[in-house]
Image: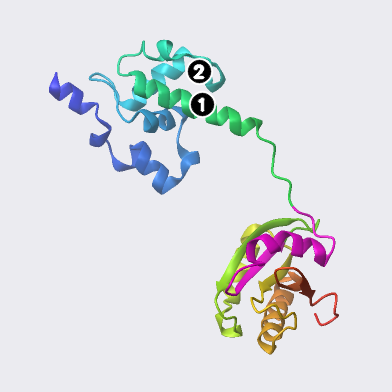
Amino acid sequence: MASTSKSFSIKNWSKDDRPREKLIHKGKSSLSDAELLAILIGSGNREESAVELCKKILHSSENSLHKLAKFNLKQLQEFKGIGEAKAISILAALELGKRRAAEPLEEFDKITSSKDVFRIMNPYIGDLDHEQFWILMLNNSNKVIFKFPLSKGGITATMVDTRLLFKSALAQGATALILAHNHPSGTLQPSQADKTITQKIQKAGELLDIKVLDHIIVTEKTYFSFADESIL
């Protein structure tokens, strides 16, 4: 019996067939429902691997996750190898999926003025005691589709890797950028380094048809806009 149990162990499968390894190397979308459930329960029983057991569970619900989500603890525990802990894991995962589906989609921030950029960025960098330089990526509707800090600390043109910046912009499908950084000192006037960075990114964007719409300097209570001051 021990040898039979061992032969069904996922550990003895080819690495390409093991659910966890498959997820790592091929991505979560490459896994079947049974394989995803198998990762949750971790192991099967003496006659079946975790994947085979999960196939049986899914078959009992007509291969419908919606119907499986209606099972209770007792129903799941009727399957050999599914104890209370595994049953709870399955129900919890299905409930999370249900809540995710019911959650409203994120509304992207639409940029209509420099004030919108300040409203978005002030909570992130307005009261920091060090400088951070952020990039906001926009789509054709001027909605922010992605934002991230490009660098931290003192800002110089040499710290900006335009190749990585525009690689990310292309991957996100961005058609425009807005630059933003803070001045912990409270001064609103752009430095020569600020202007140099802006020009460097703007020139690189022109080659890829990605516009730099503005560069905002943020302080705790107010801001400076390159576009508003006609220096962009």
Q: Is residue 75 left or right of residue 161?
A: left
Q: Is residue 159 above or below residue 116?
A: below
Residue 94 is tagged as 1
| Image quadrant in which you'd find residue 216 | bottom right
Question: Which one is nearer the viewer's eye here, 99 or 20?
Answer: 99
Q: Is residue 41 left or right of residue 109?
A: left
- Residues packed near mark 2 inside 10 Å, few (<14), some (14 to 19) or many (20 plus): many
Q: Which residue is mark 2?
A: 68
Label total for image: 2
Q: Position of residue 133 (x, y in %)?
A: 62, 72
Q: Is residue 160 above or below residue 70?
A: below
- Check whether the beta carbons of the residues at disc 2 and disc 1 lie within 8 A of each other: yes
Question: Which one is nearer the viewer's eye here, 44 or 98?
Answer: 98
- Residues packed near mark 1 inside 10 Å, few (<14), some (14 to 19) or many (20 plus): some
Q: Is residue 77 above or below residue 40?
A: above
Question: Which one is nearer the viewer's eye here, 155 or 189?
Answer: 189
**Residue at the farthest left position:** 2
Residue 133 is tagged as none
Q: What amino acid is labelled 1 in the image?
A: Leu
Q: Position of residue 80 (x, y in %)?
A: 31, 14
Taking the spot 50% from the left edge, 40% from the top edge, the residue there is: 29
**Residue at the farthest bottom position:** 192
Taking the spot 67% from the left edge, 60% from the top edge, the residue there is: 123
Q: Secondary structure at mark 2?
A: helix
Q: Position of residue 116 (x, y in %)?
A: 79, 61
Q: Is residue 111 above or below residue 54?
A: below
Q: What quarter of the picture does the N terminus occupy?
A: top left
Q: Earlier in the sequence, mark 2 or mark 1?
A: 2
The boundaries of the magenta stretch are: 109-137
The stretch drawn in magenta includes residue 114: yes
Measure the alpha-carbon separation of dots 2 and 1.
8 Å
